[in-house]
Image: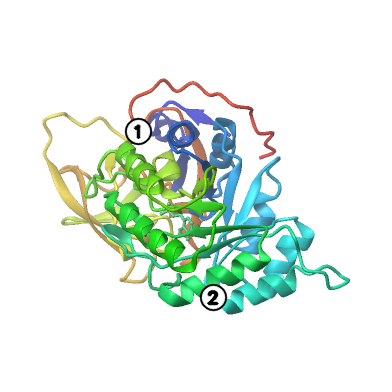
C-alpha cells in the first residue's frame, strides 16, 4: 500500500480516476490508545463501523483485543485476528449464526433481549449429546432513552420493566456469567445519556435481585463533525464511572464498552473529483450509495478541503451541496459543505472524518462503489483527541493485505 504525506501529495502524483478511500491508521491507533488508557474496563471495537484491514491492524497494534461482531460475515472475518475475544452483541441472531459462532468458532458471549432469543441460544449451544452449555456469557440488552444522539437505537432493540427483570432472572439460571448491556444511540454528544442508561440498569438490578458479573455500556461515544461538536470525551468516562459506582453490584464486575464511531471516524477520508459545478451544487464521483450514505440520509456534515491546488488564505469559503454520480436524485448530500468560492470542475476534494460507517455502507449501485485505497500520514481534518505524540506501541498484528 502506497503511503503519502497528504491527500495533496497523492492527488498530485496520481490524479485518481476513481474515488479514493484514504486511511490514516495512526488516527485509529491514537483513538484506541485513548480509550484503553481512560476506559475502566475492556474496550471492544464495534467491527461493523469499518473493517478495513489497515484500521483493524492499527487498532490491534494499539492494544485492542476485544471485538463486537454483529453477523456471521463479521465473525468469519474477525476470527482471523490472533488472540481476539469476540462478542456477538446483536440481540437477534439466526439459529445458524448461534450454532456456527459457538460450535465452529468457540464464541460464547451473546446478547439477547427476548425469551425467544434466550431459548434459541440455549438450544443451539447444546452439545451433540444434548448437554446444556456451561460456559455462556449472556448479556441482557436493556432499552434506554436516547438523549442527544444522532442515530437513536432505542426502538429496535432492548427490553424494559418487569419483562426485563424476569428475563434477567431466567438468563442468570443458564449463564456462567450474566451481564447487562445497552446502547445510548450513535454520535451521542453529551454524557447524560449514559447517566440515564445507568439509572435504568440500577432499577433493573434492584427489581430482579440478580447479581450481575458484567456490565457493557455499549457504543455511542461521539466523534467530531463541523456541525456536531461534543463535549470532552473525558466527561463521558467520568459520568460512566460515577454512574457505575452507584450501582448495587458486587466488587469486581467486569466493565466493557463497544465504541465504533469514536475509534475510526477520524481515520478515513474520501477523496473525490468534481465532475460538474452548477451554482452551489457540486457533482462528484461518490455519493449516497457510496461512502456518503450518512451525509445523504442522516444529514451528516463532513469537513472538506480542496486538495488539488493551492487556495489563497483570504479566499471566501461558501456552502455547497453535493450530488453523487448515480442517475438518482436522492443521491444528494445537502451539507452545507464549506469550500472555497472558486471550486470548479476538475478539482479534487478531501471529505474528511468519514471513517465510521462510510466504507462499511458503500454499495455498487449504477456501477459505482469501487475505490482506490491509500494511506495518508498527516492528521485528520478534525480531531476529538488531545494532541499527544503518535508513538505506536503494543504488538504489531501480522497482516497479509
Ligand atoms: C451493539 C452495538 N454495539 C456498538 C455499536 C457501535 O456504535 P457506535 O459506532 O455509535 O459507537 C453499535 C452500532 O450500531 C451496536 O449496534
Q: Nearer the viewer, residue 75 or 290?
A: 75
Which quadrant would the N terminus be assigned to in this image? top right
Q: Which residue is mark 2?
A: 114
Asked whether, in this view, residue 136 is left or right of residue 146, the answer is right
The answer to whether one can see residue 45 in this image is yes
**Callout 2 environment at 10 Å: few (<14), some (14 to 19), or many (20+)?**
many
Helix, strand or loop under label 2? loop
Query: Going from the N terminus, do you reach mark 2 or mark 1 first?
Result: 2
The dot on residue 301 is none
Which residue is outermost to the bottom?
116
Side (left or right) of 274 relative to 43: left
Front label number (2 vs 1):
2
Residue 385 shows which numbered tag?
1
Residue 392, x across and y down, in percent: 53, 24
Q: Residue at x 32, y 70 (%)?
A: 330
Q: Quadrant of residue 115?
A: bottom right
Amino acid at each position: 500500500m502506497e503511503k503519502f504525506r497528504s491527500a495533496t501529495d497523492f492527488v498530485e502524483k496520481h490524479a485518481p480516476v476513481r474515488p479514493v478511500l484514504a486511511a490514516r491508521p495512526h488516527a485509529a491507533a491514537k483513538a484506541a490508545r485513548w480509550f484503553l488508557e481512560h476506559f475502566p474496563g475492556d474496550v471492544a471495537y464495534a467491527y461493523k463501523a469499518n473493517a478495513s484491514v489497515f484500521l483493524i491492524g492499527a487498532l490491534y497494534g494499539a492494544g485492542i483485543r476485544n471485538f463486537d461482531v454483529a453477523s456471521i460475515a463479521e465473525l468469519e472475518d474477525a476470527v482471523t485476528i490472533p488472540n481476539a475475544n469476540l462478542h456477538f452483541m446483536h440481540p437477534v441472531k439466526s439459529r445458524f449464526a448461534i450454532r456456527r459462532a459457538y460450535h465452529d468458532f468457540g464464541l460464547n458471549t451473546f446478547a439477547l433481549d427476548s425469551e425467544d432469543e434466550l431459548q434459541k441460544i440455549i438450544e443451539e449451544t447444546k452439545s451433540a449429546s444434548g448437554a446444556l452449555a456451561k460456559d455462556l456469557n449472556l448479556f441482557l440488552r436493556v432499552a434506554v432513552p436516547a438523549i442527544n444522539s444522532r442515530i437513536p437505537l432505542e426502538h429496535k432493540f432492548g427490553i424494559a420493566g418487569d419483562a426485563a427483570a424476569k428475563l434477567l432472572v431466567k438468563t442468570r439460571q443458564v449463564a456462567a456469567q450474566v451481564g447487562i448491556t445497552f446502547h445510548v444511540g450513535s454520535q451521542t454528544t453529551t454524557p447524560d445519556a449514559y447517566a440515564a442508561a445507568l439509572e435504568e440498569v440500577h432499577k433493573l438490578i434492584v427489581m430482579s435481585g440478580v447479581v450481575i458479573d458484567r456490565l457493557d455500556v455499549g457504543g455511542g461515544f461521539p466523534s467530531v463533525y463541523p456541525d456536531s461538536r461534543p463535549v470532552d470525551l473525558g466527561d463521558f468516562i467520568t459520568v460512566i464511572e460515577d454512574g457505575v459506582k452507584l450501582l448495587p453490584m458486587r466488587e469486581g464486575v467486569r466493565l466493557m464498552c463497544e465504541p465504533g464511531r469514536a475509534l475510526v471516524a477520524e481515520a478515513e477520508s474520501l477523496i473525490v473529483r468534481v465532475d460538474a459545478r452548477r451554482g452551489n451544487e457540486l457533482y462528484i464521483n461518490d455519493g449516497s450509495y457510496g461512502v456518503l450514505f450518512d451525509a445523504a440520509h442522516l444529514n451528516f456534515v463532513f469537513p472538506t478541503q480542496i486538495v488539488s491546488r493551492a487556495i489563497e488564505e483570504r479566499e471566501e469559503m461558501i456552502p455547497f451541496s453535493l450530488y453523487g454520480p448515480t442517475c438518482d436524485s436522492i443521491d444528494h448530500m445537502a451539507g452545507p459543505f464549506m469550500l472555497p468560492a472558486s471550486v470548479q470542475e476538475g478539482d479534487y476534494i478531501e471529505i474528511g472524518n468519514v471513517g465510521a460507517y462510510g466504507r462499511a455502507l458503500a454499495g455498487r449501485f449504477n456501477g459505482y462503489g469501487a475505490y482506490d485505497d491509500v494511506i495518508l500520514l498527516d492528521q485528520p481534518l478534525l480531531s476529538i483527541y488531545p494532541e499527544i505524540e503518535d508513538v505506536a506501541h503494543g504488538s504489531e498484528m501480522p497482516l497479509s493485505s
